[in-house]
Amino acid sequence: MALPTLKMFMINNGGFDLLAFVLCYFQVCWCVQGQLKVGFYSQTCPSAESIVTSLVKEATTVNPRIPAILLRLHFHDCFVEGCDGSILVDNVEDPERKAFANQGLDGFGEIETAKAQLEANCPGVVSCADIVALAARDAVNLSGGPFYQVETGRRDGRICNESLAAEIPDVNESIQVLKSKFMKKGLSDKELVLLSGAHTIGSTACFFMTTRLYNFNGKNVSDPSINPKFLEELKAKCPMNGDANLRIPLDNVSSQTFDGRIFRNIRAGFAVIASDARLYDDNITKRIVDSYLGGSSFLQDFPKAMVKMGQIGVKTGLMGEIRRKCNSFN
Ligand code: HEM
Ligand SMILES: *[C@@H]1O[C@H](CO)[C@@H](O)[C@H](O)[C@H]1NC(C)=O
Ligand SMILES: *[C@@H]1O[C@H](CO)[C@@H](O)[C@H](O)[C@H]1NC(C)=O
Ligand SMILES: *[C@@H]1O[C@H](CO)[C@@H](O)[C@H](O)[C@H]1NC(C)=O
Ligand SMILES: *[C@@H]1O[C@H](CO)[C@@H](O)[C@H](O)[C@H]1NC(C)=O
Ligand SMILES: *[C@@H]1O[C@H](CO)[C@@H](O)[C@H](O)[C@H]1NC(C)=O
Ligand SMILES: *[C@@H]1O[C@H](CO)[C@@H](O)[C@H](O)[C@H]1NC(C)=O
C-alpha cells in the first residue's frame, strides 16, 4: 500500500542507494512475515509431499477409516488457533483434544509416523501443521475425490488449551450458530456448505446421534427433518441406551467415496448428523445445497474451500516453530 509513495519518493531523489535500501527492506520484511505457497518445501525437502502421500496410502490399506479421520483432523486443527498443529499436542494439562467436540478424533499416530520419516530426511524443516494439511488432501484424493495443490509453509503453534476448542462447531447447533462460527474464521455460507460436504465420507459414533434421535431441542422427540423410514433405521443402529461408541456411516450410500452424495441425502431427509440436516433449515444454505444438486460442481468447488480453510490463522515466516515431534512443543 505504501509502495507507490515510496517509489515516487525514490524517483524524486533519484538515489540508487535508496532504491537498494527499499528493495532490501521489503525483502527482509517478506522473509520475516512469510506466506503460504504451493511447493514451499521443493528446495528444502523435495520428498516431503511424496512421503506424506505414501504413508497415508499405506495407513489406509491397514485401516480404511484413515482418510476420513485425517480429513476431520485438519478441520479441527484449523478451527482452533489456526492451522498450526495445536490439536496434535498431548502433553499439556488440558489439551484441546480433551474437548467435547473433539471426541473420536484420531490419526495422531499416522501424523507422528510421517513426522518421524520427515525428520529423518530433512530434520527441522516440515511443520506438523503442513503434514496435517497434506494428509487431508491425500485423504480426499485417495477416496476418489479431486486432487488439489496444497499451500505449505505453515509453522507450528505454541498454544494448546482445551478451553479454546469452544470455537469448533457442535453437532446440535442451529444453522445461525454454525454460520457464525464459520464466519468468524473468514468462511462464507457457501464454504460452510462445501466443507460440510466432507461428510460424504466417514462415520459418526452413536454418541453424536443421541440428542438428534431422542432428545431433539431438549424435547423427548426425534429431529422431524429425518425421513421416517430412515429414522427407524438410525434408531435401530443407535438405540437410546445402546453402545455410544458404535459407528454409523455419514453417507448412507457411499461412505468411502468422496462423491458429494451427501447433498442428495440432505435434501431427502437422509442426513445422518444434525449439523448436515441444519443446512436445509436456512434459505441461503438450502439454496447452496440445491445448487450442488444441479448446476454447480461440488468436486470442483470443494478444493477451493479446503485451500481457504487451510489458510485460517496460519503462522508463517518466523512465527511459531517447527516441532521435532508433533505431540509436544519443542
Ligand atoms: C459444520 C460443522 C461440523 C460439525 C458440527 C461436524 C461434526 C462432526 C461429527 C459429530 C462427526 C462424527 C465424529 C465421530 O464420531 O468420530 C464428524 C465426522 C467427520 N467430519 Fe465433521 N463436522 C463439521 C464440519 C466438518 C468439516 C468442515 C470437515 C472437513 C472439511 C469435516 C470432516 C469430517 C469427517 C471426514 C468426518 C468423519 C470422521 C471419521 O469417519 O472418523 N467435518 N463431524
Ligand atoms: C489421485 O488419485 C488417483 C487415483 O484415484 C491417482 O491415480 C492419482 O495419482 C492421485 N493423484 C496424486 C497427485 O496423488
Ligand atoms: C487455558 O485457558 C484457561 C481459560 O482461558 C486458563 O484459565 C488456563 O490458564 C489456560 N491454561 C494454560 C495452560 O494456558
Ligand atoms: C449436543 O449433542 C451432544 C451429543 O449428542 C450432547 O451430549 C449434548 O448434550 C448436546 N447439547 C445440547 C445443548 O443439546
Ligand atoms: C419419551 O418418549 C418415550 C416414547 O416416545 C416414552 O417411552 C418415554 O417415557 C418418554 N420420556 C419422558 C421423560 O417423557
Ligand atoms: C439413502 O439415501 C437416499 C437419499 O439420498 C434414499 O433415497 C435411500 O433410500 C437411502 N438408502 C438407505 C439404505 O437408507
Ligand atoms: C424462506 O423461504 C420461505 C419460503 O420460500 C419463506 O416463507 C421464509 O420467509 C423465508 N425465510 C427467510 C428467513 O427468509
Image (tube, rainbow, N blue to C red):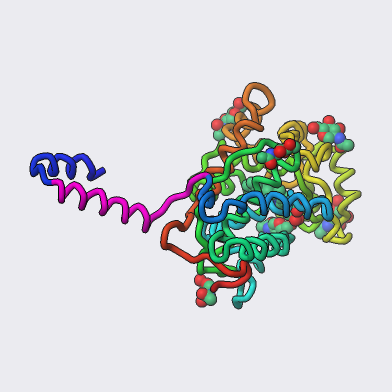
Q: Is residue 26 visible?
A: yes
In this view, the residue in front, 250 or 220, is 250
For ligand 4, the image quadrant comes to bottom right
Q: Which residues are magenta?
A: 16-38
Q: Quadrant of the C terminus?
A: bottom right
Horizontal and vertical percent position of residue 183: 50, 46
Left or right for 187, reference 50: left
Q: Which corner quadrant of the image does residue 246 belong to?
A: bottom right
Q: Residue furthest left?
A: 13
Q: Residue furthest top?
A: 295
Determine the residue positioned at 89% across, 60% down: 242
- Taken as a whole, is the magenta stretch helix, strand or loop? helix
Left or right for 13, reference 243: left
Q: Quadrant of the N terminus?
A: top left
In the rendered image, residue 24 lying in the magenta stretch gets the answer yes
In this view, the residue in front, 254 or 39, is 39
In this view, the residue in front, 7 or 15, is 15
